[in-house]
């Protein structure tokens, strides 16, 4: 993508439509990643509350809930972060490309 | 007990190396802008280490272990949310703020709302949160020195460490240089992980040690005080629990001593306390996750990356580096419960907060000198932890005081020399206040205090950043009202619970704060209010956001005129070059 010239003189990127679309796409990505994270973050205390026996069962000496919170939570968050980063980089590239295409069109 | 020279040597080496590296790096980068420009050439790996190094404070290094030991499962939320709050920062705030090019929260406040007044408000708030965050670092310092020099009063340790770091900052060393912070991360990582591996190989695995604590769901009957538990082929033992130690069932399970304290004090039974406990847990989660996303000293380093892609990769590595780190401190807490239970009877700096420092000495009987060496290593890590965080805070608070309060508000016409001199005076002033506050808080847990600092950040900065980035209808008045109401109310609530806790301390602090003792009767009668005051985030964050929306709607006319351009700079990919365009428009001749 680096070979695309920055389309600074474009009218399109200054339009309401572009900004609205841009923010909506970014927010949708951020919210869906946050939702995956929040389901587990909010769900774990609820599971502890409503299913204490199940969460207290032993897994290799740990209680299940200790294992989830003290160890497994970290890799889970890494996965979400990884997905978010690759998608948001792809999103930016496609925004730059769209802006460049529109810029070309407006010149023609 | 005598001074152990191994421990002393390792600690001294850490201090000397840190001070030396600070001065050496300070010589090569003289100004704040040098620091940022130099940072831009730094690789992703170094930068990620530096961010992690700055982030892992005494709370992470000593406090988490101490709190897991004293409160069990519930304390695990702290390390998890310290690490995962970063995700929120990444998802909603880091990218836009980077594109906007605002180095600090005051910079952002001024740029987003074109308002120097708001900048001043934000600066004052930086100082408030900063002081709240220095207190636990000082407790870490006092605890560590009292451990290295047995018999040394706690406040002397606080004063000595405070004076050394303040002097260092005032003389120009330790400017938050990337290299120093990065090395500090690896010292901390080494110091927390190596002793854990050695201890686990001696005392059995993490899971095995946890299994020595009976959970209510375990089929076997409650254990005797001295116990031998069969686990696989190797029997494991633990020591007698003193009376003050929490019971096994409460310690290992969720909704234990930490979250039920208020309801228990009110005399509620186990079933009645559970909903209160759940509320406490959720409020704690909100505070820690949103607080991380609003911590000002973390945000700054997002600009030391060459571009947005590198910034995102750096964040990924930061999350991995701090996530791996946070697996270790709870292990100290678990081992401490089994093998150093006498700490439960200790108060202040002699209590569980020093478990990380003392635990390695247990293997002295078996391996002699190795125990002292490992204890020296964890002491070195503790020094790295509170020194890096305290000096980072001191630099940013002093900067705010000297450049913003003095340079912009009090004496706008001052010369650069006057400001440099003022920087030194301010460093001494800030350091002095931090030492004073730090010497008051010996009875409070390190981790607990950091949690409260996070709650205040969560109810002020997080709503400010989140709403300003994603909602164009925000006005300066709305932002200021929301940030101040949320932050000040959370601060007041947290302070109220702290003074009432200090009032019942058996030590000297109890006398000093004795007039607040009556408040504890009120808390007993109203456990719900006590929880909401101790963990204010669950009401303070929504309150701040609602106030921002309502007041902004009422002052709609004052939305900055070029708001669309500002939003574009915040959100459009950096490759489109809108930032340069924006700067040209602002600095060029008026159209």
Image (cartoon, coloured by chain):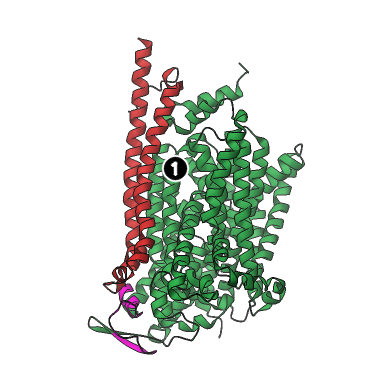
Chain colours: A red, B green
Q: In this view, does B28 lie to the left or right of B431?
A: left
Q: In this view, does B2 lie above or below B565?
A: below
Picture quarter with the C terminus of chain B: top right
Q: Position of residue B411 (x, y in %)?
A: 77, 40
Q: Quadrant of residue B326?
A: bottom left
Magenta segment: does it hold B227? yes
Lateral position of residue A10 relative to residue B456, left or right = left
Residue A18, given in percent of the width and then of the height, sits at 41, 24
Residue that numbered label 1 is attached to: B92
Residue in the picture at 61% in, 34% down: B554
Looking at the image, residue B334 lies above or below residue B177: below
The secondary element bearing badge 1 is classed as: helix
Please tell me whether residue B140 is drawn above or below residue B127 in the rendered image: below
Q: Where is residue A56, by image quadrant?
A: bottom left
Residue B556 sits inside the magenta stretch: no
Tell me the crowding category of disc 1: few under 14, some 14 to 19, or many 20 or more residues within 10 angstroms, Cα based. many
Q: Quadrant of the N terminus of chain B?
A: bottom right
Could you tell me which chain the residue with mark 1 belongs to? B
Whether residue B157 is visible to the viewer of this picture, yes or no, is no
> Toward the viewer: B9 or B165?
B165
Q: What stretch is highlighted in magenta?
A: B205-229
């Amino acid at each position: 993508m680096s070979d695309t010239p920055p389309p600074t003189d474009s009218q399109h990127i200054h339009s309401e439509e572009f900004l609205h679309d841009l923010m909506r796409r970014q927010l949708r990505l951020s919210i869906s990643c946050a939702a995956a994270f929040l389901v587990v973050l909010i769900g774990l205390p609820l599971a502890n509350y409503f299913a204490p026996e199940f969460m207290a069962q032993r897994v290799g000496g740990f209680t299940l809930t200790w294992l989830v919170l003290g160890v497994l939570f970290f890799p889970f968050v890494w996965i979400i972060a990884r997905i978010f980063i690759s998608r948001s980089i792809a999103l930016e590239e496609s925004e730059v490309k769209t802006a460049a295409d529109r810029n070309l069109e407006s010149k023609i | 007990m005598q001074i152990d020279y191994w421990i002393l040597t390792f600690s001294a080496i850490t201090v000397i190396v840190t001070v030396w590296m600070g001065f050496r790096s300070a010589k090569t980068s003289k100004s704040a802008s040098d620091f940022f420009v130099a940072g831009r050439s730094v690789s992703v790996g170094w930068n990620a280490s530096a961010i992690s190094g700055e982030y892992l404070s005494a709370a992470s290094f000593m406090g988490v272990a101490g709190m897991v030991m004293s409160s069990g499962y519930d304390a695990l939320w702290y390390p998890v949310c310290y690490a995962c709050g970063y995700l929120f920062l990444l998802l909603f705030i880091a990218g836009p703020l980077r594109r906007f090019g605002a180095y600090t929260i005051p910079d952002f406040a001024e740029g987003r709302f074109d308002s120097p007044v708001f900048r001043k408000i934000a600066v004052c708030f930086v100082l408030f949160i900063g002081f709240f965050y220095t207190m636990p670092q000082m407790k870490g310092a006092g605890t560590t020195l009292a451990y290295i020099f047995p018999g040394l009063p706690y406040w002397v340790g606080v004063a000595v460490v405070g004076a050394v770091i303040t002097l260092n900052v005032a003389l120009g060393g330790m400017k938050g240089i990337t290299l120093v912070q990065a090395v500090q991360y690896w010292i901390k990582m080494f110091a927390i992980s190596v002793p854990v591996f050695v201890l686990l190989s001696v005392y059995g695995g993490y899971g095995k040690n946890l299994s020595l604590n009976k959970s209510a769901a375990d089929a076997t009957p409650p254990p005797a005080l001295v116990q031998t538990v069969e686990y696989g082929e190797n029997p494991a033992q633990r020591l007698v629990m003193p009376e003050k130690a929490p019971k096994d069932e409460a310690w290992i399970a969720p909704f234990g001593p930490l979250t039920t304290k208020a309801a228990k004090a009110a005399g509620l039974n186990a079933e009645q306390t559970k909903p209160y406990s759940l509320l406490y847990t959720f409020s704690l989660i909100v505070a820690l996750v949103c607080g991380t996303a609003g911590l000002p000293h973390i945000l700054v380093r997002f600009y030391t990356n060459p571009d947005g892609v590198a910034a995102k990769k750096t964040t990924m590595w930061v999350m991995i580096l701090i996530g791996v780190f946070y697996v270790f401190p709870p292990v100290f807490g678990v081992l401490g419960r089994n093998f150093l239970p006498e700490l439960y009877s200790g108060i202040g700096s002699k209590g569980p907060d020093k478990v990380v420092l003392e635990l390695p000495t247990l293997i002295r009987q078996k391996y002699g000198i190795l125990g002292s060496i490992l204890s020296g290593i964890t002491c070195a890590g503790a020094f790295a932890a509170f020194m890096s965080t305290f000096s980072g805070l001191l630099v940013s608070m002093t900067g705010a005081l000297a450049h913003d309060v003095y340079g912009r508000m009090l004496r706008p016409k001052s010369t650069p020399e006057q400001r440099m001199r003022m920087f030194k005076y301010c460093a001494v002033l800030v350091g002095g206040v931090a030492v004073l506050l730090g010497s008051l808080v010996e009875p409070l847990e390190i981790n607990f205090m950091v949690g409260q600092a996070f709650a205040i950040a969560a109810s002020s900065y997080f709503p400010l950043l989140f709403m300003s980035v994603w909602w164009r209808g925000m006005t300066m008045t709305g932002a200021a009202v929301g940030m101040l109401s949320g932050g000040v109310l959370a601060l007041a609530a947290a302070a109220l619970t702290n003074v009432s806790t200090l009032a019942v301390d058996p030590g000297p602090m109890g006398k000093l704060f004795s007039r607040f003792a009556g408040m504890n009767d009120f808390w007993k009668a109203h456990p719900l209010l006590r929880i909401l005051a101790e963990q204010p985030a669950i009401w303070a964050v929504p309150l701040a956001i609602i106030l921002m929306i309502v007041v902004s709607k009422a002052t709609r006319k004052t939305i900055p005129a070029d708001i669309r351009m500002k939003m574009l700079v915040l959100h459009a990919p950096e490759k489109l070059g809108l930032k340069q365009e924006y700067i040209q428009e602002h600095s060029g001749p008026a159209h």
